[in-house]
Amino acid sequence: MSKVSLDGRVAIITGSGAGIGRSHALELGRRGAMVVVNDLGANLDGSGKSTSAADAVVEEIKSAGGKAVANYDSVATTQGAENMVKTAVDAFGKVDIVVNNAGIVRDKGFAKMLEEDWDLVQSVHLKGSYNVTRAAWPVMKENNFGRIVFTSSGVGLYGNFGQANYAAAKMGMIGMMNTLRIEGAKNNIFLNAIAPNAASRMTEKVMPPPIYERLKPDYISPLVAYLCSEQCKESGMIFNCMGGWYSRTAIMCSDGVILGLGKSEVTAEEIMENWDRIIAMENMKTIGSVQESFAYLSPLFK
Ligand code: NAI
């Protein structure tokens, strides 16, 4: 087996003072990456801050023989994200890798969810991923190399009671990735998303103990290390990962049905009549861009 090496690469890993991010930082550090350990040191609901979480992980990486520096900014601010990139460039000369991992939760049933619960969750997950990616983008373009990982969630991809704010943010980053995949390709900037499940303070009260004990964050980081490596040429994919299970998940399109052939009008009754064909999941394919989706209309132009 050839080795997945991150030697000489510079990685910013957001929220890597604890949980899954800490595991990524240690794994990337072990594989030779120089790591900016970003962590605001926030509570699970986004309140508070502390420098100790990031500092502890930097020490762990250094004592294992790796290179790391801490950054305590919030991903939710443009200035914070720019500082992260500056920290990386000042300490190690560049940025090759961004793992957007920082996260909080403000779970509530939709009727009880306050606007601030919505806004704060968007600002950390979606805007935060935008901020750090945007700040690193010009450096990656300049160096003709970039690997970016978005931390999405099964909650966004598949749904979960009480997490409309979080689900929207986690799906929003998939939309951002789909477009950046197209924009980044010519500069060797590849982006992928993971939908992890792992034991952390975020899940300790919601996962049954027998499951919690087996879903170690260490199972997530090897996938992230590979996605961040030069060997990985994949871009725009989404991966489920938990407890040693790795699988691709995707937004797909079926053949569906063409009604009216662009000449006659289509009625609601025809839609109802053809419902089984419209929703049939037959011949499913992924679509590489919005332009590609127009291929389904080709019978109109014959
Ligand atoms: P965690 O709560 O253990 O770690 C999150 C870290 O992010 C904390 O150290 C926190 O201080 C930091 N953070 C929070 N807000 C920040 C901000 N504004 N700027 C910088 N750092 C900030 O959570 P966990 O479980 O490790 O989650 C990591 C990521 O994985 C999150 O994006 C989460 O939504 C996602 N995720 C986790 C799942 C799980 O099963 N644990 C499931 C699906 C997704």
Image (cartoon, rainbow, N blue to C red):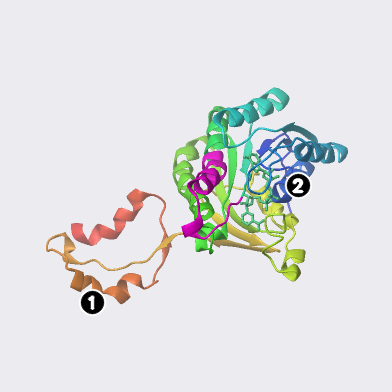
The residue sitting at the top extreme is 90
The residue sitting at the right extreme is 63
Residue at 84% over, 41% down = 60
Magenta-colored stretch includes residue 107: yes
Q: Which quadrant is home to the C terminus?
A: bottom left
Q: Which mark is residue 27?
A: 2
Mark positioned earlier in the residue sequence (1 or 2) = 2
Front in this rendered view, residue 28 or 1:
28
Query: Which quarter of the picture shows residue 270?
Result: bottom left
Residue 115 appears in the picture as rendered: yes
Q: Which amino acid does label 1 sit on?
A: Glu
Q: Going by the image, does 46 lie left or right of 3? A: left
Residue 274 in the image: state x and y as whole percent.
25, 74
Q: What stretch is highlighted in magenta?
A: 105-129
Query: Across the whole image, how many numbered discs are drawn on residues?
Result: 2
The residue sitting at the left extreme is 264
Is the CB–ligand 1 distance for label 2 below 8 Å?
no
Magenta-colored stretch includes residue 190: no
Q: Which quadrant is home to the N terminus?
A: bottom right
- Up-down relation of residue 45 to residue 9 (above or below): below
Front in this rendered view, residue 165 or 156:
165
Residue at 68% over, 29% down = 88
Residue at 20% over, 67% down = 259
Residue 2 in the image: state x and y as whole percent.
73, 51
Give the labeled residue for mark 1.
Answer: 273
Tag 1 secondary structure = helix
Q: Going by the image, does 235 lie left or right of 198? A: left
Front in this rendered view, residue 261 or 26:
26
Q: Going by the image, does 262 lie left or right of 290? A: left
Q: What residue type is labelled 2?
A: Glu
Tag 2 secondary structure = helix
